[in-house]
Image (cartoon, rainbow, N blue to C red):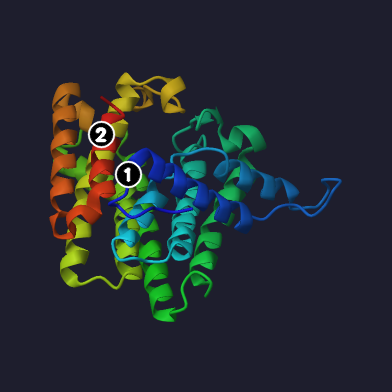
């Protein structure tokens, strides 16, 4: 499993499926499962909830960003798949908690009942709580990378992206500003934390693993910044123009909860135009990589076109 060289005939869809399968194999291996045949092991419900939330769904977009960025520097497949799996664990923890009634109150996730609907709120909270440290356990394992300095940089980067100055901070702003009118700068700041910080780490992880030069770090940082905003605009659009069957979660909830979004400020057509502009800007950041950045360039357009 993993990416083929970018001068091959492998399409973006094939590459994403290939990486997703490899990451799923890692996740299935590292996620705990009950050893009790009768199902009475005390932690069995927790283990089942963790596996339910992580396995059997999701585009694995963030792990693919790790993989595609790492492939720019010929990082071994076994390494980037484990780092991608760690990112997916953090992402899925955030989805479990975001779906809770005290947060966004979403009953559907990835086309099936949300974790708290399936297992109850208490178990869902604990399942999310358990996924987060498992991600850092995975990054700290020498099997992920033999160099402790690299492992430390990955751990620090993911912690910052996931914490109060990243994803969690963005979620706090999102909850605190429901019903308020925000300007475009405030919405951009919110989304750079809530969505963009983790996407940024994915690309940075590839650069860390590949011991990239400063110029290459900056190129990937610029790419991930514009990609993160394009992704969020596309997500906002899907909430307006999508449906449950194609999106895999409830739609129309942003307007119902009085949330300020790119759509509430720009409108549908201007938001689409802005998303396409950001996708093109993201791709342009990768010029220094030549043809090796093909899958990342195509991904920038892919995340926008899913909402067109």
Q: Which of 60 and 136 lies nearest the eye of the viewer?
A: 60
Q: Position of residue 119 (x, y in %)?
A: 66, 37
**Image quarter of residue 180:** top left
The numbered disc on residue 95 is: none
Residue 237 visible within the image: yes
Q: Residue at x 37, y 66 (%)?
A: 75
Q: Which of 8 and 98 lies nearest the eye of the viewer?
A: 8
Q: Is residue 187 above or below residue 129?
A: above
- At mark 1, the secondary structure is loop
Q: Residue at x 81, y 52 (%)?
A: 41
Q: Is residue 15 above or below residue 29?
A: above
Residue 232 visible within the image: no
Q: Are marks 2 and 1 in contact (CB under 8 Å)?
A: no
Within 10 angstroms of label 2, few (less than 14), some, or many (20 or more) residues?
many
Q: Residue at x 42, y 66 (%)?
A: 76
**Image quarter of residue 116:** top right
Q: Is residue 53 above or below residue 291?
A: above
Q: Residue at x 57, y 43 (%)?
A: 55
Looking at marks 2 and 1 on the same chain, the residue that comes earlier in the sequence is marked by 1
Q: In the picture, which quadrant includes the C terminus?
A: top left
Q: Position of residue 242 (x, y in %)?
A: 35, 21
Q: Which residue is mark 1?
A: 9
Q: Which residue is mark 2?
A: 304
Within 10 angstroms of label 1, few (less than 14), some, or many (20 or more) residues?
few
Q: Position of residue 68 (x, y in %)?
A: 33, 54
């Amino acid at each position: 499993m993993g990416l083929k060289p970018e001068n091959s005939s492998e399409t973006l869809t094939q590459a994403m499926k290939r990486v997703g399968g490899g990451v799923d194999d890692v996740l299935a291996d590292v996620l705990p499962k009950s050893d009790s045949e009768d199902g009475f092991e005390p932690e069995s419900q927790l283990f089942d909830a963790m596996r339910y939330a992580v396995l059997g769904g999701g585009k694995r977009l963030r792990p693919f960003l790790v993989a595609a960025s790492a492939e720019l520097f010929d990082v071994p497949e076994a390494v980037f798949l484990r780092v991608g799996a760690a990112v997916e664990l953090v992402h899925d923890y955030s989805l479990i908690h975001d779906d809770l009634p005290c947060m966004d109150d979403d009953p559907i996730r990835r086309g099936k009942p949300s974790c708290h609907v399936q297992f109850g709120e208490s178990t869902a909270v604990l399942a999310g709580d358990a996924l987060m440290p498992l991600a850092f356990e995975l990054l700290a394992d020498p099997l992920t990378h033999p160099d402790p300095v690299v492992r430390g940089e990955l751990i620090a980067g993911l912690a910052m992206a996931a914490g109060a100055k990243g994803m969690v901070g963005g979620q706090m702003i999102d909850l605190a500003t429901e019903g308020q009118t925000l300007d475009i700068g405030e919405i951009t700041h919110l989304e750079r934390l809530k969505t963009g910080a983790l996407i940024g780490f994915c690309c940075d992880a590839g650069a860390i693993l590949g011991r990239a030069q400063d110029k290459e770090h900056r190129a990937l940082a610029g790419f991930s910044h514009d990609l993160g905003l394009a992704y969020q605009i596309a997500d906002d659009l899907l909430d307006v123009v999508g449906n449950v069957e194609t999106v895999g979660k409830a739609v129309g909830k942003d307007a119902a909860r009085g949330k300020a979004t790119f759509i509430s400020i720009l409108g549908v057509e201007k938001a689409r135009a802005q998303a396409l502009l950001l996708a093109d800007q993201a791709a342009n950041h990768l010029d220094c990589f030549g043809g090796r950045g093909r899958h990342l360039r195509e991904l920038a357009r892919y995340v926008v076109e899913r909402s067109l």
